[in-house]
Image (cartoon, rainbow, N blue to C red):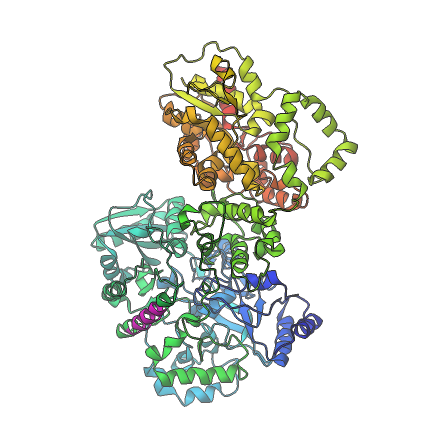
Amino acid sequence: MTDLRELRAGLRAVVRGDVDFGTTARALTTMDASNYRRVPLGVVAPRDADDVAAALSVCRSYGVPVVPRGGGTSIAGQATGTGVVLDFTRHMNRLLSLDPGARTAVVQPGLVLDRLQEAAAPHGLRFGPDPSTHSRCTLGGMIGNNSCGSHSVAWGTTADSVRELSVLTARGDRLRPGRDWAGAPAGLRELVDGELARLRTGFPDLPRRISGYAVDALLPERGGDVARSFCGSEGTLGVLTEAVVDLVPAPPARALAVLAYADESGAAEAAAGLLAHGPLTVEGMAADLVPSAVDLPRGGAWLFVETGGDTAAEARARAEAIVRAADVLDSLVVTDPAGQRALWRIREDASGTATRMPDGTEAWPGWEDCAVPPARLGAYLRDFRALLAGHGLRGTPYGHFGDGCIHVRIDFDLLTGPGVARFRRFSEELADLVVAHGGSLSGEHGDGQARAELLPRMYGAEAVTLFERVKALWDPDDLLNPGMLVRPAPLDANLRFAVLPREPVDVTFGYPADGGDFSAAVRRCVGVAKCRTTSVAGPAVMCPSFRATGEEEHSTRGRARLLHEMLAGELVTDGWRSTEVRDALDLCLSCKGCRSDCPVGVDMATYKAEFLHHHYAGRLRPAAHYVMGGLPVWLRWVARTRSAAVVNALAAVRALAGPAKRLGGIAAERDVPRVAREPFTRWWRRRRRTGTPGPGAPLVVLWPDTFTEHLSPSVGRAAVRVLEAAGLRVTLPPTVRPGGGRIGDARSRSPLSLLAVRRGRVCCGLTYISTGRLDQARAVLRRTLDLLEPVLATDAPVVVLEPSCAAALRTDAPELLHDDPRAAQLAARVLTFAETLERHAPDWTPPPLNRPVTGQTHCHQHAVLGDGPDRRLRAAAGLTGELSGGCCGLAGNFGFERGHYEVSAACAEDRLLPSVREAPGDAVVLADGFSCRTQLDQLAGVRGRHLAEVLATALEEEE
């Protein structure tokens, strides 16, 4: 048995990179994007090839296996192992050189594909293969799997773009695999010379044959290409440390022809006939993977056929020619780049969205990417559907129809013995079906553990024995990624679900989308790692903390992996008390970006609140939880005592503010926001209601959230001004529960109020939820619902100005009070400021501003509420331009807590602050969230305004 302390010490003595045998590092690498799980001994992040050689030497001396790992997005399990994981994403992630003349690049294995594409683009070049995970997959992983992507009909697989490799064998040999037998290990050429007949006849001629070793690339007529043969070896032959890859010219202009068919079989049968027209892509997907709101031509399935050209007119002409040649129900040609990106996002997110059937049932990989000859795809799909039905299974095929490669997630039951047995039977029968159609078990993602056991059905026993002989020449000690490709583990062993509890975990939130099962909620993360994207465009938010730190544990996937291991109890053994999980969640901003941007809808903000609730149960919490979490209480106390001026004066005295911030767990770098001397509701009570809409006007209830009430009452005043100008009658929620049942106005002057039970003021509970004080949050929300019963008895909408509070009422409240139907009633009644004007004052025209805007869409608005009405309202007011995505980084209490300042500022520098700096001088800086406005003020000295304030100012200037 390996002595872990000696192994760790041996590695640390010779490796200049990172050596981590801690619980967190191991938990983060137990899984990839497959159904499998293995617990490694430790993780090494080498700095260079010398580090790799040193690590291999130590592991060889201890007989410990080594698993190379890139982005961890493999779908067959080949990026997991029980030995030492080599993580190339931390240090060996650079583009070493790019030669536009030769159209080549030299890359390290941890380089993310998008970084190479960005460097090549100014030269009119690109790397041909582009998997849907292009924003986070690495070149090393692509070479290991021989990845392809949607443009493979034009530019082939990764093996077609590899010129030369630098490889270390497990025994320390440094090889340079290339063409003409360059870099071949001893004995490989002799082995091939003795198997020429088998290599010429036993390997299917397919554009997407990824299964097994590509030994046929070593045939004399194919140039004895050792580099090509190495591609797709899944880290089992040698460790890649560098690669010379070919680049291809990128078409200056593109068009996208969307072809509609009655069903997926019709689309599949049409795909092969389009290849003669030279398209860049022929991708297929059916209606059950397409959001209902997407505007596609009528049909039940679609082909996305991309064309290129030197000009936009040329690209469009080619797309229109394909439309004319295709027999379709309907069609659409998209030339607008933004429109094309929106459609491609649907296709790229399919690997995640397909993990949930339309009824919410879980679906899993395992038979993700079989490939058959393109001309046989329609027939294969019909047989595949029949096989699914025969086993009582469901799946949604999609993928690279032009290459005959189909992706599918299937609703296997991998939680019970009978379900796993059916998974095995289906896998065996499907392997036979694929072979009967002349296909390959893997057409893109490799064999791994998912399919390697079944390779004899595709190649025969003698060819598989040949694979074993090849492996023995490269890696005679079977040190590299054992159990993959040759002598594989059974396809139904090491399933990642086997370690999870079988009974539902006792939790506070309702998890309605997961049947109330926290384990099912955690299982949502299948590892596609969209949260590891290092740069985002458009309105996307996820995952700001990962972009700030670059650390896996601060990604949504990393946190989900730690929660998975917490539930498993094998590696993380202290359950809800786990410090590893706590520390990983500490930098989660609760922005809820993952709720919308994660293809499978992981909601890490909710998981974090749940964890903190249990972690601190019966224990003293961090001071910031009491100070920031209890903000509504403290601010109401200041308002009642009318001590805002005193509080502001004391906070301005550095000698007093410093110790107070230390005691309260607040970052020393932060200024304490000033408390308004007159709260919003006090202004409301004393204002003169002259010229307001009469009793017949539509009634709206304006929610006085904590931030508007005590810190930004100008937003509330502006909202009242605009809502009334739009012909709406504004009132505030009751502060008592009157016996008469009519809506109060925050003054409670009715005689009935003398008999009423005082309930205080409404509150969404956000600050309690974000700090995990869920018992207090539930109590606050129940009191709020008691107060709002008269409101809920009417059809009046509840207008919430603060996006984070609106999101809490719309999603957190009904999920936290899943046993109280009033919470769902209130959630359905909540509207944003722009939604209210659009729905209840549709004929109102805002004052013309005719100015550009800058700023950021609030992360909760993007993730939960939607910003369509805001966009339309801005356009109607002549406010031009787009707001950036991302998160401001302050995120309520997060950016104020001690230890979070640097990450908070880095998040602001990701999107928000650059967009404001680059804006025209006359741009209106919009920031609907109090946190966003505070961050702008404290980090950039810029005043951001709520849209209501901007419109109210314009109304006043018109008068």
Magenta-colored span: 421-432
* Residue plotted at (63% across, 32% down): 937
Closest to the observer: 553 or 464? 553
Can you give x and y, in whole percent of width and height, for residue 296 in the image?
29, 46
Query: What residue occupies the far front of the structure in this picture?
Result: 755
Task: Say above or below: 402 vs 189.
Answer: above
Q: Determine the main secondary structure of the stretch shown in magenta.
A: helix
Residue 706 in the image: x percent, y percent? 56, 29
Can residue 429 be found in the magenta stretch?
Answer: yes
Image position of 682 with respect to 533: above or below: above
| Front position in the image: 702 or 88 | 702
Task: Name the residue nearer the viewer: 367 or 398.
Answer: 367
Task: Please tell me which residue lies in front, 386 or 634.
Answer: 634
| Quarter assignment of residue 498 | bottom left
Left or right of 886: which side holds 340?
left
Query: Which residue is drawn at the image coordinates 41% and 85% (left, top)?
Result: 465
Asked if residue 856 shows in the view, the reply is no
Would residue 367 be found to the left or right of residue 261 on screen? right
